[in-house]
């Protein structure tokens, strides 16, 4: 067997004493030299992968980490991560990255299938399509398409790690260590190029090292630039990206305008928000300044956060005669994540006003109403557009006589494309070993497919709290709604959520019937309380709480992982990376500083953070050494001077 060019390069470099950089250059030249002689057969892909493995082995020796660095393995990627906090990394978001790889894989499969390109994923079971042939004798004859239908000669196959000229162009706007981009290169087939961008010089240098460490230079390119300027410079019709991934530290609001302009026609835009305090209603005025919508602090705040982000994306896309189509929108852990496609069309943009709605939420009982911003009515072969009519409610709540808060506008259309979500779910089930979090992906997507396309939800604890009674079981309340002839589902955003097409009056009638079975002491209810007004009205329907079999959804019966437990202590958002690499204040210390709450007992209980009343009055005998407990200090003084007690005269 003839020796590979890489072996000759290795010997030549050893004799010449060349350094690692020269070794990489010569090695890549030898790979390109071998690729010229590859015949266009299936074996060429295997030879190419072998050469890439050889190159990766040499490059891992060159880019080996130092003692102050660690290697983090996630998926098929291994990245070098500095011990100091120079570059941001959060291991809890592995689910986010796994789900993104799964979604982009199916999006690429869908896009390239139209170009005659198929996928080969390691470990994926082949999808057997069955054709039913009705024969003359009336019997069904099932035939596998793979056995009887020959594949067209013009179709070809791409594998993971192979650069596809007709593939997707991907941008990771805020790459940090480059882990996500490297995982795309190592796990997602059908990609043409990946740009891993960051506006930190230390981060870009680390990205280059990690690209070299994983041997994916043929797919991933490190770039130092402001993500907004990079996207603004790629607004040309032929220069746009097919996939843009934005996962910033905090709010992505400043990047959305550039993103909706630099994404290709029908491209996939992936956006993460971790500023949940803003989106969930703690700072409604800040939410309006960033996303153009007023957030409300309510039980449905996590789904409302998703709809606020979708509203902001659609609003900014409308400025350029573009509109969004949500493919998947999830709320998980401490963040929200949306996957939307962006299209261009003036007629569709006119429909956008009818897709947004104002939200009226009662401050007493939590009843909510939506008011569409616009109307779109068919008029012959065209559509007639007009402003929405209202208001949908009175000055006070009809159930508890309390006031309403006004929120929004929010996205009032479906959050997901159920057909696309089912494709991602099917692919995950065919390859359960692909991701470490595959079980959670299957549980989450299964709940998404079961969700009703109805905005927002109620929670059982809030309904029971409003009428001051104990809480019915989830199956009992769902069964009551089903017996009443309404649809009902759970929500992935909240464990005890109830999404239903029933009107608020039906929901409160069911709670009144439940209160009759579990009565409260009405004489103790205040006349101004919501429970007093709600229970003061007799129910117009008779609720049936007998548990139905279809009240328990499939994902719940199968015991899928829908809401995982906290993965680790202080698992929320990590500290922002610092340019100098300094270690930021720990989360526990920040909690004490901002909330003035001590989670654990102090090490020295003799000290306190405030002075006693006698010290403020100037009559404390201890002076500046005053502590919370004087007895401890007195005992210390007595132990240091035992003669003091002997010489003290008796009183």
Image: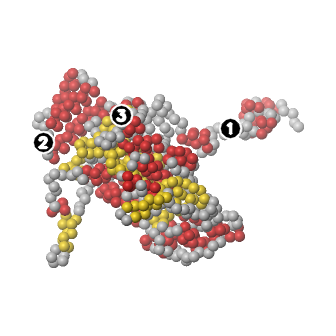
From this view, report whether residue 491 is shown above or below residue 177: below
x and y percent of residue 424 in the render? 33, 55
Dot 2 crowding, Cα within 10 Å, few <14, some 14–19, many 20+: few
Badge 1: residue crowd in 10 Å (few <14, some 14–19, many ≥20): few
Q: Which residue carries the number 2 mark?
A: 39
Q: Which mark is residue 609?
A: 1
Numbered disc in front, either 2 or 1: 2
Q: CA distance from mark 1 to mark 3?
A: 49 Å
Q: Could you tell me how far apart the alpha carbons at marks 2 and 1 are, in whole angstroms?
A: 77 Å
The residue under the point 79% across, 38% down is 614
**Going 51% across and 35% down the picture, which residue do you hit?**
584
Give the distance between the C-alpha atoms of the residues marked 2 and 3, in whole angstroms.
34 Å
Mark 2 or 1, nearer chain start: 2
Q: Secondary structure at mark 3?
A: strand
Q: Which residue is mark 3?
A: 223
Q: Which circle's residue, 1 or 3, is located before the other in the chain?
A: 3
Q: Position of residue 308 (x, y in %)?
A: 49, 52
């Amino acid at each position: 067997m003839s020796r590979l060019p890489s072996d000759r390069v290795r010997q030549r470099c050893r004799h010449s004493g060349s350094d690692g950089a020269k070794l990489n250059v010569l090695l890549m030249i030898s790979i390109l030299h071998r690729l010229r002689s590859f015949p266009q057969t299936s074996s060429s892909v295997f030879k190419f992968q072998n050469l890439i493995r050889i190159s990766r082995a040499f490059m891992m020796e060159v880019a080996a980490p130092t003692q102050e660095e660690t290697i983090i393995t996630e998926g098929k990627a291994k990245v070098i991560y500095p011990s100091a906090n120079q570059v941001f990394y959060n291991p809890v978001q592995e689910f986010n990255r796994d789900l993104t790889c799964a979604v982009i894989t199916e999006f690429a499969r869908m896009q390239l299938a139209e170009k005659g390109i198929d996928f080969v994923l390691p470990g994926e079971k082949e999808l057997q399509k069955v054709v039913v042939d009705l024969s003359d004798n009336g019997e069904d004859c099932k035939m596998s398409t793979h056995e009887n239908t020959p594949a067209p000669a013009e179709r070809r196959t791409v594998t993971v790690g192979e650069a596809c000229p007709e593939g997707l162009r991907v941008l990771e706007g805020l790459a940090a260590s480059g882990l996500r981009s490297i995982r795309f290169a190592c796990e997602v087939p059908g990609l043409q190029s990946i740009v891993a961008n960051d506006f930190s010089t230390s981060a870009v240098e680390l990205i280059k090292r990690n690209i070299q460490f994983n041997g994916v230079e043929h797919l991933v390119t490190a770039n130092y630039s402001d993500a907004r300027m990079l996207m603004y410079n790629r607004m040309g019709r032929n220069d746009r990206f097919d996939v843009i991934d934005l996962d910033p530290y905090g709010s992505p609001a400043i990047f959305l305008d550039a993103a909706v302009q630099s994404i290709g026609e029908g491209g996939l835009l992936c956006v993460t928000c971790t500023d949940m305090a803003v989106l969930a209603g703690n700072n409604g005025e800040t939410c309006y300044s960033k996303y153009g919508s007023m957030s409300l602090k309510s039980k449905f705040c996590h789904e409302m956060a998703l709809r606020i982000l979708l509203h902001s994306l659609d609003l900014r896309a409308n400025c350029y005669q573009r509109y969004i189509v949500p493919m998947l929108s999830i709320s998980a852990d401490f963040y929200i994540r949306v996957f939307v496609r962006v299209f261009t069309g003036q007629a569709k943009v006119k429909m956008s006003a009818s897709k947004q709605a104002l939200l009226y939420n009662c401050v007493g009982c939590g009843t909510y109403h939506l008011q569409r911003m616009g109307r779109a009515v068919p008029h012959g072969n065209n559509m007639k557009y007009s402003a929405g009519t209202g208001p949908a409610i009175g000055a006070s709540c009809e159930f508890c006589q309390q006031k309403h808060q006004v929120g929004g506008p929010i996205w009032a259309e479906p959050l997901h494309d159920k057909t696309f979500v089912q494709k991602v779910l099917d692919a995950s089930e065919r390859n359960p070993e692909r991701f470490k979090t595959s079980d959670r992906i299957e549980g989450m997507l299964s709940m998404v497919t079961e969700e009703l396309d109805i905005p927002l939800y109620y929670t059982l604890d809030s309904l029971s709290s409003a009428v001051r009674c104990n809480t019915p079981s989830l199956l009992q309340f769902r069964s009551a709604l089903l017996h009443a002839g309404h649809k009902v589902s759970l929500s992935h955003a909240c464990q005890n959520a109830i999404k239903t097409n029933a009107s608020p009056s039906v929901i409160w009638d069911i709670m009144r019937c439940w209160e009759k079975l579990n009565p409260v002491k009405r004489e103790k209810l205040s006349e101004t309380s919501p429970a007093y007004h709600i229970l003061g009205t007799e129910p117009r329907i008779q609720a049936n709480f007998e548990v139905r079999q279809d009240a328990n959804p499939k994902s719940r019966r199968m015991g899928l992982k829908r809401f995982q437990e906290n993965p680790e202590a202080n698992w929320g958002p990590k500290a922002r990376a610092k340019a100098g690499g300094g270690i930021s204040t720990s989360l526990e210390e920040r909690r004490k500083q901002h909330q003035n709450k001590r989670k654990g007992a102090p090490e020295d209980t003799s000290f306190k953070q405030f002075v006693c009343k006698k010290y403020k009055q100037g009559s404390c005998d201890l002076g500046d050494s005053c502590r919370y407990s004087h007895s401890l200090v007195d005992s210390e003084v007595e132990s240091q001077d035992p003669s003091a007690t002997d010489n003290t005269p008796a009183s």
